[in-house]
Image (cartoon, rainbow, N blue to C red):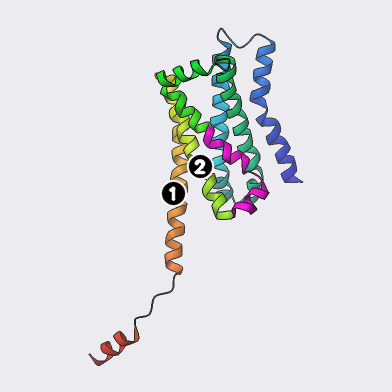
Amino acid sequence: MKLRLTKIAIFLAALIPLARLVWKYLHDGLGANPIEFITHATGDSTLILILATLSITPLRRITRQYWLIGVRRMVGLFAFFYGTLHFLTYIWLDKFFDIHEMLKDIAKRPFITIGFSAFVLMIPLALTSTAGSIRRLGGKNWQRLHRLIYFTGILAIVHYAWLVKADLRKPIEYGVVLSILLLYRVGVWASEKISEKRKQPAIPAPAASRTEATKA
């Protein structure tokens, strides 16, 4: 019951950025450049939800609130949802599906290539977010695949930093949060490796070596 109510609350909270955009659109609140406003709004929402997805596992381990793992998939799918809106804003509202214009834009502005790469990496994560995918891929293979979200986060932050150029406050804030999460992940990985080595039984010396040592 608690998990169900939490999922409903997170679902509604994740729709707030979209509802805000619709409200502003209906009340002429998108500013002088609506496309730019929508682009930044959907991009921010995507990054925030990517970082929220990555923070769930550390929070679960630190707080021992193991039910948190039950909401990670929903948060991740919402990150993909806003990433899709961000991508559609560019190819539809900005470029009107003009492939020639998009190719020229990519050649002139590399941050678009970085952003597109971040979005492409999110696609297999969204497609394999089901319990059936975990069974088909196997737990370890699924975990390896879903580590792509760290690369997605890195590329998304680089995309943002190259986009704004001068005012780097937000990209830096996102980068600091992602760095902390990455350091935590590396720390956990190193701790697990050390524990595995300690659990390994000592390899006994060959019988011949022991006999020679006794004679000596």
Q: How many marks?
A: 2
Residue 127 shown left or right of residue 47 in the figure: right
| Mark 2 element type | helix
> To which quarter of the image does residue 146 belong?
top right
Residue 43 shown left or right of residue 69 in the figure: left
Residue 128 placed where, x, y %?
62, 44
Give the mark nearest the N terminus, 1 or 2. Answer: 2
Q: Please indicate, yes or no, whether residue 188 appears anywhere in the rendered image.
A: yes
Marks 1/2: CA–CA distance = 15 Å
> To which quarter of the image does residue 210 belong?
bottom left
Magenta residues: mostly which secondary structure?
helix
Q: Residue furthest bottom?
A: 215
Which marked residue is nearer to the observer: mark 1 or mark 2? 2
Q: Amino acid at mark 1?
A: Val
Q: Which residue is mark 1?
A: 186
Residue 42 placed where, x, y %?
58, 24
Residue pictured at 47% horizontal, 48% vertical: 185
Q: Is the C terminus in the top left, top right, bottom left or bottom right quadrant?
A: bottom left
The mark found on residue 45 in the picture is none
Q: Amino acid at mark 2?
A: Leu
Residue pictured at 69% horizontal, 16% vertical: 23
Residue 20 shown in magenta? no
Q: Residue furthest front?
A: 100
Viewer-proximal residue, 178 or 92? 92
- Magenta-colored span: 120-138
Residue 68 placed where, x, y %?
64, 46
Q: Tags 1 and 2 in contact by the CB under 8 Å rule?
A: no
Residue 130 shown in magenta? yes
Q: Which residue is mark 2?
A: 148
| Mark 1 element type | helix
